[in-house]
Amino acid sequence: MTIEKLTENAISLLKKLIVTQSFSSEEEQTAVLIEAWFNQYKIPFTRTKNNVWATNKYFDKSKQTLLLNSHHDTVKPNSAYTNDPFEVIVKDGKLYGLGSNDAGGCLVSLLATFTHYYEQENLKYNLVIVASAEEESSGPNGLNSMLPIIPHIDVAIVGEPTLMNLAVAEKGLVVFDAVIEGTPSHAAHPNNNNSIYNTIDVLQWFKDFKFDKTSEALGDVKMTVTQINAGSQHNVVPAHVNLVIDVRVNDAYSNQEIAAILQEKSPCTKITPRSLRLNSSAISTNHDLVKAGIAMGRKTYGSPTLSDQACLTCQSLKLGPGDSIRSHSADEFIYLAEIEEGIKIYIELLNRVIV
């Protein structure tokens, strides 16, 4: 099978994925389409809920294992769409449709790459591919649920739109719920402990606070108050104000360290992380994958957006066709040339590392 034919078939699969609804936790039918890909190439596979995965033909437990991963779920289309999000439109070299860029183009390119290497003997790494579910919702039945099931992973390539540049680090995420307390009262009476007024200094603290450690790839930790809620009627001073704080964590901190710092230092009455599992991730610039990519002229950078890398504990590289700026946008699209280039770059990169 030539790379050109694999590319043609990959684009055909992407078109089928676009017209098939696959919101997070509703990926049953796109999983069927991915099963059909493996059946077409006579590659044994396993489906675990809506995750579909396979290993290369000559898998050898004595070798290290490289994971190829991307997801087939999508967000729901936003109200600004002018096209039908489930209609395949090809115009001016662009393939339009929900999930085309995030991350259908990456997924079909990795499927083509895996298929290219499936029957090759004497690879330096084993290959495992997982077409995962529930990435957009960070749900319980996505890649995170597959890690105890698939073989042990030593390093991973996670397919997300990076313009085929090397995202050598990715920020983690911790969302906090915080409470600022005061004295409830009738609005007509004096109150020197108004919870809403107390919030002014707390908001200023969050605005001004800086975490000490910076990262060469990811810069500073970014902390943003994103929600505030208090009160139920005009003449009652509420007993408390609720805040939501979004913290994007660099690779200099663990999520647990961020939580400990805020629980010790923040002026809130109470501050509680919703989850600590969406960790930052990185790969050494001395890793063979990164060195090979740099030798091919690909740029390195740190990614501010979250992906399935967050559930991996091994080193991982985010790399894929398409542009992250287009993700979740109205009239989402990917250039067909980006898929063609993506498959060639994936194959050349692996050729330098695993052959």
Image (cartoon, rainbow, N blue to C red):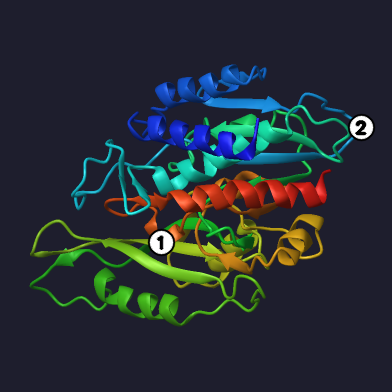
Give the SS element for disc 2: loop
Is 198 placed left or right of 118 in the picture?
A: left
Residue furthest to the right in view is 62
- Which mark is on residue 325? 1
**Residue 143 in sight:** no
Specify which label sits upstream in the sequence, 2 or 1: 2
- What's the amino acid at mark 2? Ser
Q: Position of residue 21 (x, y in %)?
A: 33, 30
- Identify the residue at image location x=41%, y=63%: 245
Q: Position of residue 310 (x, y in %)?
A: 59, 49
- Image: 295 above or below 80: below
Q: Residues within 10 Å of mark 2 (few under 14, many from 20)?
A: few
Q: Quadrant of residue 144?
A: top right
Residue behind mark 2: 62
Q: Are marks 2 and 1 in contact (CB under 8 Å)?
A: no
Q: Quadrant of residue 57?
A: top right
Q: Quadrant of the C terminus?
A: top right
Give the SS element for disc 1: helix
- Identify the residue at image location x=32%, y=31%: 19
**Residue 281 in sight:** yes
Q: Quadrant of residue 65?
A: top right
- Identify the residue at image location x=66%, y=40%: 68
Q: Residues within 10 Å of mark 1 (few under 14, many from 20)?
A: few
**Could you say which is closer to the camera, residue 341 or residue 141?**
341
**Could you say which is closer to the camera, residue 327 or residue 343?**
343
Disc 2 from disc 1: Cα separation: 40 Å
Q: Position of residue 123 (x, y in %)?
A: 85, 37
